[in-house]
Each structure stands twice: as C-alpha cells, then as structure tokens.
Amino acid sequence: MEIKLQKISVTSKVLSVLGGILFGLGIYTFNYAQGISYLTNNSNVCTNCHVMQNNYNAWIKSSHHSVATCDDCHIPQDSILEKLLVKSRNGFNHSLAFTQQNFYEPIQITPRNQMITEKACRYCHMNFIKAIDTFHNKENSLSCIRCHSEVGH
Amino acid sequence: MKKKFICGGIIAASSLITIGLTALIMNIFERKQEAKNPFYSIVEVTDKTEDPSIWGRNFPLQYEGYLQTKDMEGTYYGGSKPILHTPTDNDPRLIVSQSKIEKDSRLKKMLAGYSFSRDFREERGHAFMLEDQIFTERQLATNQPGTCLNCHASTYKAYKELGNGDITRGFEKINTLSYDKAKKLVKHPISCIDCHEPESMQLRITRPSFIEGIRAVKVSKGIENFDVNKDATHQEMRTYVCAQCHVEYYFKGEENRLIYPWINGLKADEILAYYNEINFKDWTHSETEASVLKAQHPEFEMWSQGIHAKSGVSCADCHMPYKRVGALKISDHHVRSPILTINNSCQVCHRKPESDLLSCIKDIQDKTSQMHSLALDAVVDLIDDIKLAIKKGFLNEQLTEARNYQRNAQFLVDFIGAENSTGFHAPQESARILLQSIDYARRGQLSIYKNLLFIPKNHKPELLK
C-alpha cells in the first residue's frame, strides 16, 4: 500500500512534526538524566542527583555494602510489580523535590519507606529474627532499625 | 472551526510540554555543572593575599557565608542582639550588642576596678571582631598591648612580614607594640588566610601561642614534640583552627607574650592552679583588694571535657556544618550557634525532631544558668563580707584567706560565664566547676566569720533554724 505525501493533510503533518520534536526532546532529556540507569540495581545510581552522596559514602564503609545494595533494603523484594511501583513513586517524589530544591535536610525516611526497609531486614535475617520475635515481639512492635539504624549507612 | 480549535489546543499543550522539558533539561545541566566544579579558579591566591574578597572570587559560596557573620541573631543565652548606639568621638559605631554588665549588676561588682567593669558586651560575629575591639570603652580604661590583635584581626601577613618570614618572631614584635601602633599593621577581621593554606586550602595553624599551648597539652598526654601543623589529624584541625582564639589566656611578663595556660591541663581548676603557682593576677579588685583573674571565652577547654569531644565531634562539625548548595557540599562559613542550624548541625547524627533537640539544649542551658547565678550570688556575698570586714577594721592578715578564696571562686564562676555555650559544651564539668566556685566563696565567708568580730551582712539566722 502506497501512501502519497500529498494526501496527508497539512494539519496532520504539522502535528506529526510537533509530536516528533516532543518525543525526541523527551527521549533526549530521559537519556541526559540517565533515565535507563534507574531501572538497574546499582547503588551509585542513587547518587545521580547528588543528595544521597553522603549516604552512599557511608554505605561504602558500612558492614552491609558487600551483601546489599541500596535497592535491596529500600525497594520491596516481594514482587516485580511492587518493586516497579515503589521505584517510580520514590523516583518521582525525589526528582520533584530536587528540581524544586525545597526539601528538608538532612533528608529523612518516610514512614512508608521505613516499613519497606524493616521488611528487608526480616527478609534476609528471618531465621535469626524468628527467635527474637517469638519472645519479644508479641504485638509486632519490635523494630530492627530502631536500634541498628547505622548498619546500612 | 472545531478542527482548528483542537489543533490550537494541541499546539498550546505541546508548547507547554516543550517548555517544561527544556526547563528540566537546563536544570539537570546546571546541577551537573555544579557537581563538576567544586570551586572556581579565577584569581591566584598566594600566602600574601590577605583580602578575603580576593579568595572569595574563587570560593564564592564560602565567602558568602563568611560575610554573613555580620548577621546579629540572639539565642536563649548567647548570640547578639542589635542595640542602637549614639556615635561619639571615640566610638563611631551605630549598632552594638547588649551589655553583659548592665544586664547583671553582679558581674560589674565582681569585675570592679577592671576595664571590663566599664564595657563588657555580648560577642558579635567574626565580622565585627576588629572594630568591636578598636572601639570598646576598655581601650580608654587601660593601655592595651598589640597582643590583643592576635585574636581580633587577620594577623598572619603582619606576623610574617614583621618576622621576615617567621611568624613567631613577628608575633613577638607585635606583642611589644602598643595597640594603637599595632592596629595600623592589620586591615581585616579573621580572614581565609588565617586558617587555610592558600595552595591546597588545607587547614593550618597560624598562631604561635596555640602551637606552644597544644604542645604542652600533648606532653601531658605523653606525646613529645608535637608539631600541630604536621602531626594533627584533619579532624583535630577542624577544632584546632578555632582553638587558636576561643581559649583562656594571659599576657606574660614585660614582653606581653600571649600564653595559653595549659601546662597542668585544660580543666578550669587546673588552669587556676597554674595561675596560683606562678602568682599571676589580671588586676586588683577595687572593693576588696584581692588579686583576681578574668577568664576569657574558654570554649576549647570546656568542649574538651564534654561528650562531643570524646566522640570525636569537632567545632566545625556543629558550628560550620556541611550544607548542600545545589549539587555541591560545602562547609557553612557562616560560623554561628548550632541552635540556628539544628538540622545540619545536630540531626546529621541525632535522628530526632528539632523540637526535641532544642529542648535538650535548653534544658542544659537553663540548669547551668541557674547554677551560675547561685555561684555569682555566693561570690558577691563574699565580696560584700570582705568589704564590711575592711570597714570594721580587719587586719590584712585576717583577710588573706578570704581574698584567696575570692580569687579562686570568681575565676571559676567567670570561667563558666565567659564560656559561650552556657554549659552545653560540657554540662557535668560546668556543674562541677560552679559547685567548686560556690564552695570557695562560702569558705571565704566562713574564714571571715571565724573571727566573730561582727555580724556578717549576709548571715541569715532563719536559715539555721
């Protein structure tokens, strides 16, 4: 099937060009902002926007750096869907805050993200934690990171 | 018509999206550029560049903070509040800070006969160190020596030029000059060059008194021949550059050499013991004729006794905390009370709400302030008793003990009062020193009562019931 250029209306042509420019600009921005890197599990991705450089530096020196990346503790491990959801939610919030430069420092973890980290502790250390929970955590009130707040960074 | 409307709408929407995307990409570009250049090399700074504004062209963010030390902001017990001042021939300042002796007349009594009983104000920011020293009424009360400039001006270049390259020799020469002559050799309040080595920006010590003082401290810890500029760690230097001035000191002998009295140790009573051993006095108290001492801003000494020092936290960690500017991390050169920067100063380690941390600080300072007030009362009571005893015809021998107690008690209470943290740097140590001060003052009163020749003014029989 052959479509002749003349048959496409001027409006459609203009709109296609506009759409193309937009798409190109979008792709370029995404690439310039290292968008693809956010789909990986690399810890240094978290320092892309500089704010978490200190946390990253501390993680490098921490006991966990050889066994867990940022994502391992800050992104849910249960399902790929949840993982993507949390990544995009946090990613959006972080980029918005950093672009507007209006966030509180030092940065603090939100209760929702703290729960994710708490679950991550239990995900790896379950065998050990079971023993503690049996005796001390009847109401599910014991938190790992309340005391071990500096194991990650 | 409808088609045109839709087209127009699409064009408008895509324009907005394009504007948004371009703005975003420019924003990312800016942040990336910031991250690439932690500083700008625009002018060359050398070991002779004294003017901070020249350094400021290479380090605009740090320089901006440095300039902000002009801000006057009060905290609960410290900081400075602007007070209007009517200019006089000797003092053209339009704004000064609040007077300590007007706020508390007990201080005036304790300092009777000394220049500080004429003019004693809250310290203002670094930007004012030179002019506040030049125009204080204390200059009229006594002939101050050039030594004072050690901590009231940028003296590195003057020391170096006067000593032909040797800062210690230059320092010795300025000490012997009169203040009026010496002040002509300096231009700026403390400047970049006083703490930074110009080529590498490494921290360095430029005040001979501290080089000698810290060597003595290290000897008492079993370290011989400590050369602070070679042997100190970076974290130690982040305290030592401040400790070049925020310390207790005295002027020794005819040559007015500035000495930090740390041979016995850094604690207030160890410093007092040293002064007693060498029989040093700052002045003779005009109401009691006791040979007394004035303590001066011993922040380094108090900090050394506290939990933060023991945990390796330096002055700069709290008073010049790291802060983020765009994609850059810099030391905040707006040196000030951490109460004004709790997030960057405290919360980096203490993960608690600001209000909790603030109430911790306030609690310590309220309690210290109460104890300090009790100790000042005790010293003033002793001064009144000695005065009365003199009036009643006590012999000098009968008052020697009381006068010695006054000297000790007032140095210790002053040590906490002149220190800028109202106890925060070392709460328990402050309490110990204030208790000792009260003890000395009351023992001084008892030494007079022993003679039982008069009924003491402050004797309150109802308290004995």
Image: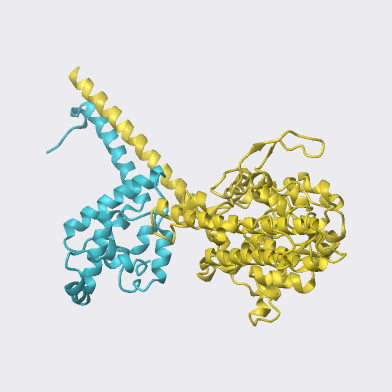
Tell me: residue A34, above or below residue B349.
above
Q: Nearer the viewer, residue A141 or B32?
A: A141
Q: Chain coloured cyan: which letter?
A: A
Residue B38: give x, y in percent of width and height: 54, 55
- Residue at point 36%, 46% (across, down): A97
Q: Residue furthest top?
A: B1
Measured along the vertical axis of the image, is residue B409 above or below residue A131? above
x and y, in percent, of residue B319 in the image: 56, 56
Q: Nearer the viewer, residue B121 or A54?
A: B121
Where the C terminus of chain B falls, by quadrant?
A: bottom right
Please name the color used to draw chain B: yellow
Image-based side of B221 in relation to B23, left or right: right
Splitting the image into 4 quarters, where does residue B410 fall? bottom right
Is B351 positioned to the left or the right of B382 in the image? left
Left-right relation of B345 to B6: right
Residue B41 falls left or right of residue B187? left
Asked if residue B71 shows in the view, the reply is: yes
> Which quadrant would the N terminus of chain B be assigned to in this image?
top left
| Percent coordinates x, y for residue B415 in the rendering | 65, 61
Q: Residue, x 41% and y 47% (percent of image)?
A: B28
Given residues B189 and B362, the one toward you in this image is B362
Residue B428 appears at what percent x and percent y? Answer: 53, 66
* Residue lying farthest to the left in this orientation: A1
